[in-house]
Amino acid sequence: MITLNLNTILRLTPEEIKNTKIRFNQFNGEVNPLDMYIQDPEMVNTQFFLWRTKQRYFSVGQIAICLLKLAEDKWLLTTIKRIMKELDVIDGVNYEADEIEEYKPYFGRVIVRFHKTFQTQGIFYETVYEQLEVNQILPDTYQGDDFPGYDKVRLPYEKLATILNVGKKDWIAALENQKAVYLITDTHNGKLYVGSDTSNNGMLLQR
C-alpha cells in the first residue's frame, strides 16, 4: 500500500517547509485537550496551541500546524495558522494568528500517524514532515470515539457528558434503544452504585 504523506495534502513548498513549526498537543496532567476539542475546538486551537510558558514556540511570519493526540501514534490535525503577532505573554496566549483558508476543509478530519520520541511539544516541520503519514481522512469533523458496543462502555462522567452535549448520534441511538443494568463508581471513595433502567421511554439514555 502506498503511504500518503501529510505534505502531499498540504503542498507546502521547500521555503514554506523551512518556515513551518508543528506543535503536538496532548494531556498535560491536568486537562485533556481532546475532551476540550470535542466541546469547543477553538479552545484547543487558541488556548492550547498558542499558549506560551517560558519557552517560545513560534515566531512572527511562521506557519504553525496544530496536532492533537488521539491515541498512541495517532494525531488529529485541528488547525494551521500563520503567526501574525507576538504578545510577549508568559503563561498565557502569546500569539495572534490567522487560520490559512485553503486548509480549513482538513481541520478535524485528517488523522496523522506519527511516533513521537522527543519530549518537547514544538518542533520544526522540516525535521519530521517525511514521517507524518496520513492514516485516515474522516467524512466529517471528529466528534469523539464511536460507540464501542454495550459490553465495552466504561468511561468517566466528563467524557459521557461531552458525548451527550455534542449529541453524538451513534451513542444517542445506542443508549436510547437499550434497557440495561449499569454501574456508577465514585472514584474518590470507591463506592459503587448499581442501577437499572426498564423504561420504554428513553431507556438507558434517560439515566
Image (tube, grey):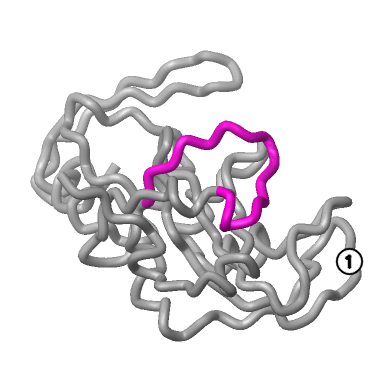
Judge from the rendering whether residue 79 lies leftward or rightward of residue 194; answer left or right: right
- Of 73 and 19, which appears nearest the observer? 19
- Of 183 and 173, which appears nearest the observer? 173
As for residue 114 lying within the magenta part, the answer is yes
Residue at figure coordinates x 33%, y 63% from the top left: 109
Question: Does 19 appear above or below 97?
Answer: above
The x and y percentages for residue 128 are 53, 49
The x and y percentages for residue 30 are 67, 39
As for residue 66 lying within the magenta part, the answer is no
- Of 204 and 115, which appears nearest the observer? 115
- In the image, which residues are magenta? 112-127
Asked where in the image residue 196 lies, by quadrant, the reply is top left
| Amino acid tagged 1 | Val
Question: Does 61 appear above or below 152?
Answer: below
Q: Is the residue marked by circle 1 packed among few (<14), some (14-19), or many (20+) residues within 10 Å?
A: some
Residue at figure coordinates x 12%, y 35% from the top left: 179
Q: Which residue lies furthest to the top in this view?
A: 190
Residue at figure coordinates x 19%, y 49% from the top left: 2
Question: Does 73 appear above or below 55?
Answer: above
Q: Assign the C terminus to one quadrant of the image.
A: top left
The x and y percentages for residue 3 are 26, 49
- Of 204 and 187, which appears nearest the observer? 187
Q: How many marks?
A: 1
Residue at figure coordinates x 13%, y 42% from the top left: 199
Residue at which label 1 appears? 89
Q: What element carries label 1?
A: loop
Asked where in the image residue 145 lies, by quadrant, the reply is top left
Question: Does 83 appear above or below 180?
Answer: below
Q: Assign the N terminus to one quadrant of the image.
A: top left
The x and y percentages for residue 45 are 58, 66
